[in-house]
Image: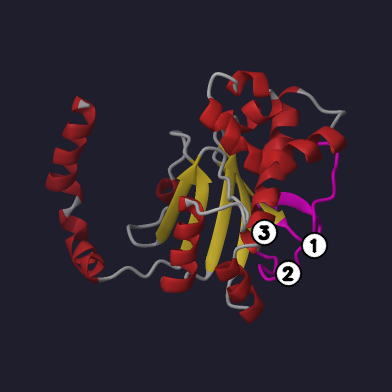
């Protein structure tokens, strides 16, 4: 805790003043262009990763970057997404998974989450991920299997996202775009899902592609 308190003092002394004008404007209103949905994992910092400033990203975090589909009951995730889409008018939504994800490891090995009943229940929102991996990636194991699970989960959660009424409405209007990313912690690389090839590609290559391309499912491949 002392480290955090020291950090606050440093922020107030050195970090706040150069951005004081920005924070004064943000105190009046926020206009983020992007909703960034990612895992609660402490190794991920969305603002550091994207080199964005306060006010740029509206951030939603939970174990496994999961979006419960419409119809399963009220959730903080659905409320947050609805606010970002319908009230703040974000233009892009990113779901970002990451390497070495403990939630996805627990999905593959449910016995590890057995002592955590709330987590086990939460991971039921990723049951489609587990089934897709079990049925299509039996030839993989270890880190390659976990990587495939992380990637497939991003795609499953994007599909869940599309079921939310506020999101579906904006997608029909054509002024909202969805993106699937995977962040590799140990190298700093980010991979984005390319709807045309049905595969994840380096984000630098993804920038050349049409973000509004027609959505398609991933083509399972030996990773």
- Give the residue pinned by disc 3: 206
Residue 8 percent coordinates (x, y): 18, 40
**Which of the two discs, 3 and 1, sits closer to the camera?**
1
Q: Secondary structure at mark 1?
A: loop
Q: How far apart, in angstroms, are the residues tagged by discs 1 and 2?
A: 7 Å
Q: Tell me what residue is drawn at x 47 percent, y 38 percent.
A: 40
Residue at position x 22%, y 62% from top? 23
**Residue 219 in view (yes/no):** yes
Q: SS class of the residue under badge 3?
A: helix
State the image quarter where residue 1 is shown.
top left
Instruction: Give whichever of discs 1 and 2 has the lower sequence position.
Output: 1
The answer to whether the residues at label 1 and label 2 have Cβ atoms under 8 Å apart is yes
> What residue would you read off at disc 1?
196
Query: Compared with residue 142, is residue 206 higher up or lower down, i.e. above or below?
Result: below
Crowd band around label 3 with a 10 angstrom C-alpha radius: few (<14), some (14–19), many (20+):
some
Residue at the (59%, 34%) spot, across then down: 121
Q: Is residue 174 left or right of residue 221?
A: left
Using the image, tell me which numbered label, if any, was put on residue 213: 2
181 or 29: nearer the viewer: 29
């Amino acid at each position: 805790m002392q480290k955090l308190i020291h950090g606050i003092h440093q922020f107030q002394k050195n970090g706040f003043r150069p951005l004081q004008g920005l924070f004064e404007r943000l105190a009046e209103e926020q206009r983020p262009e992007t909703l960034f949905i990612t895992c609660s994992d402490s190794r991920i910092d969305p603002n550091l990763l994207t080199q964005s400033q306060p006010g740029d990203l509206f951030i939603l975090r939970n174990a496994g970057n999961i979006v419960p589909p419409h119809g399963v009951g009220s959730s903080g995730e659905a409320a947050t997404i609805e606010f970002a889409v319908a009230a703040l008018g974000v233009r892009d939504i990113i779901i970002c998974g990451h390497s070495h994800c403990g939630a996805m490891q627990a999905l593959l090995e449910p016995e590890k989450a057995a002592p955590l009943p709330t987590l086990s229940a939460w991971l039921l929102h990723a049951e489609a991920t587990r089934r897709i991996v079990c049925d299509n990636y039996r030839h993989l194991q270890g880190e390659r299997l976990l990587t495939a699970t992380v990637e497939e989960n991003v795609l499953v959660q994007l599909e869940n996202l599309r079921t939310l009424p506020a999101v579906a409405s904006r997608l029909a209007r054509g002024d909202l775009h969805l993106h699937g990313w995977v962040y590799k912690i140990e190298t700093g690389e980010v991979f984005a899902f390319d709807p045309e090839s049905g595969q994840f590609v380096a984000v630098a290559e993804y920038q050349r592609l049409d973000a509004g391309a027609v959505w398609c499912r991933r083509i399972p491949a030996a990773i």
